[in-house]
Amino acid sequence: MKRGHIWPWAIPGLAALALRLSPALALAWARGVSRPLLRAMNRGTGRLPFPLAEPLALLLAAALLGASARRLRRGCWRDALRAFLLPALALLSAYALLWLPNGFSEAVQRPVSPDPGRLEALCGALVDALNADAAEPPAPADALATAPAAAGLPGARAKAARYPEWMRAKRVAGLFVPWTGEVLVDGGAAPALIPYTAVHELMHLSGVADEGMANIAAWRRCMDAGGGFALSARLWALRYAAGLLAGADARAPERLEARMSPAALALWRASGGPIAPRSAGGSYHALVSWLSRQPLHTSTQP
């Protein structure tokens, strides 16, 4: 890459550094620039009947590989490197200016896992709530259609992934794509899991970057929405809490299953059961620490 071509790409990096060093600037940028742009992109791509991010990623990968292969056959390894480097810099620049300011402006406190006694009490309360919940999980298409309203983002769009196999291979239930503003969900997952997953990813669209904080925000929104969204939130929270509890007491999941009604047990098993912290990342389990200090049967939306 010629030296004169380097400086334009340094500008987004310098801007990202300034945003990182100044939370106030990051917050102003997130509110005035990145969040409105992300929501506008979500509305724009939402007009398409399919997710745009997946075919774009495939086309970009194919184009890069083809361009690099042609240059390598001619012995132009520098040109081949440039074929990868320029698009990578463009993607990183967009990521730095569209998504990172949301995280830079957040004051995230890493939670401490509750003690086993408090964890078991929380799990028991969640199981009892699931036993008493007569709501039916909405169909996946209905959950995705109503998730934006539940998330407080009317006009937004959540979509089922066109090729969910890559999500399942990576054990990803949902994803927010900052380059297109799209919220993607594995539409073939257990129906009871989809409402909370969609709202969680929509919380990212609203500007919540940290996964633990997005989980808490999604819980609050789903509980206020009620019905299948509250059911889905309780199920996800139980998966996280039971995963932490199993780390302290391997027999705990058996006790929890013995406490479940047949309907709750069917939902539990279809969902995949406990989620160990190491398989999801510790910040996702921040919901458990927060819930251990909250009433479970009242609205928590301010």
Image (cartoon, rainbow, N blue to C red):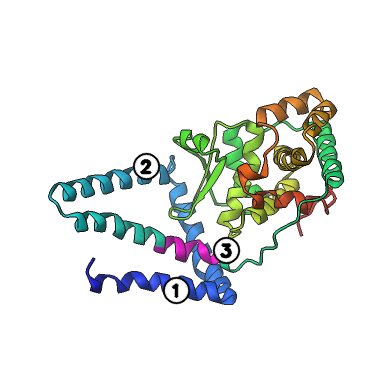
Tell me which numbered mark, 2 or 3, is placed earlier along the sequence: 2
Inspect the image, locate mark 3, and give the three-letter code of the amino acid beneath it.
Gly
Q: From mark 1 to mark 3, how far is it between C-alphas?
A: 15 Å
Q: Residue at x 42, y 46 (%)?
A: 53
Point out which mark residue 103 bears.
Answer: 3
Q: In which quarter of the image is the C terminus?
A: bottom right
Mark 3: few/some/many CA within 10 Å (<14, 14-19, 20+): some
x, y percent for residue 295: 85, 50
Label 1, on which residue?
15
Spatial separation of the CA atoms under disc 2 and disc 3: 27 Å
Task: Examine the residues drawn in magenta and state their main secondary structure.
Answer: helix
Looking at the image, residue 135 lies above or below residue 147: above
In the rendered image, the vertical position of residue 114 relative to residue 166, given as above or below: below
Q: Is residue 48 visible?
A: yes
Q: Residue at x 30, y 58 (%)?
A: 85
Residue in view at x 67 percent, y 45 percent: 277
Residue 138 visible in the shown view: no
Give the x, y percent position of residue 176. Answer: 52, 50
How far separated are the C-alphas under marks 2 and 1? 30 Å
Asked whether, in this view, residue 74 is left or right of residue 250, the answer is: left
Question: Which residue in the protein does label 2 denote?
Answer: 55
